[in-house]
Image (spheres, rainbow, N blue to C red):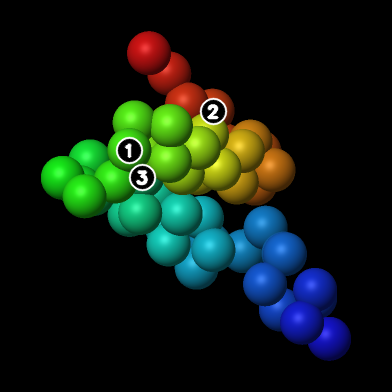
Amino acid sequence: MLENKYLTKSVENRLHIKRRLYRFQMKREVSIDEHLNEFMKLLTYMLNLDEHVGD
């Protein structure tokens, strides 16, 4: 049930992930490795939703 709700390629999910990506900023208390891991997760979510992320 959760998979059907949250892993769908709906407009709401796409907008949510895009908003998270566009507002993504590095926090001072987070290491660069953690920051890059979180960034890569967001990009992976975008690719799973069949969204193209350009340069």
Q: Residue furthest left?
A: 28
How far apart, in angstroms, are the residues tagged by discs 3 and 2?
13 Å
Disc with the residue nearer the chain's start (3 vs 1):
3
Q: Name the residue carrying label 3.
A: 21
- Residue 47 spot, x, y in % from top left: 63, 36
Relative to residue 25, is residue 7 drawn left or right?
right
Q: Name the residue carrying label 1.
A: 31
Q: Name the residue carrying label 2.
A: 52
Q: Secondary structure at mark 3?
A: helix
Q: Secondary structure at mark 1?
A: loop
How far apart, in angstroms, are the residues tagged by discs 1 and 2?
27 Å
Name the image quarter holding residue 9.
Answer: bottom right
- Residue at 80% across / 75% down in the picture? 4
Quadrant the C terminus occupies: top left
Looking at the rendered structure, the kind of residue marked 2 is His
One can see residue 39 in this view:
no
How far apart, in angstroms, are the residues tagged by discs 3 and 1?
18 Å
- Residue at 61% across / 38% down in the picture? 44
- Residue 23 spot, x, y in % from top left: 23, 49
Q: Which one is in front, 16 or 30?
A: 30
- Residue 39 spot, x, y in % from top left: 44, 37
Name the image quarter holding residue 16.
Answer: bottom left
Position of residue 39 relative to residue 13, above or below, is: above
Q: Residues within 10 Å of mark 1 (few under 14, many from 20)?
A: few
Q: Residues within 10 Å of mark 2 (few under 14, many from 20)?
A: few
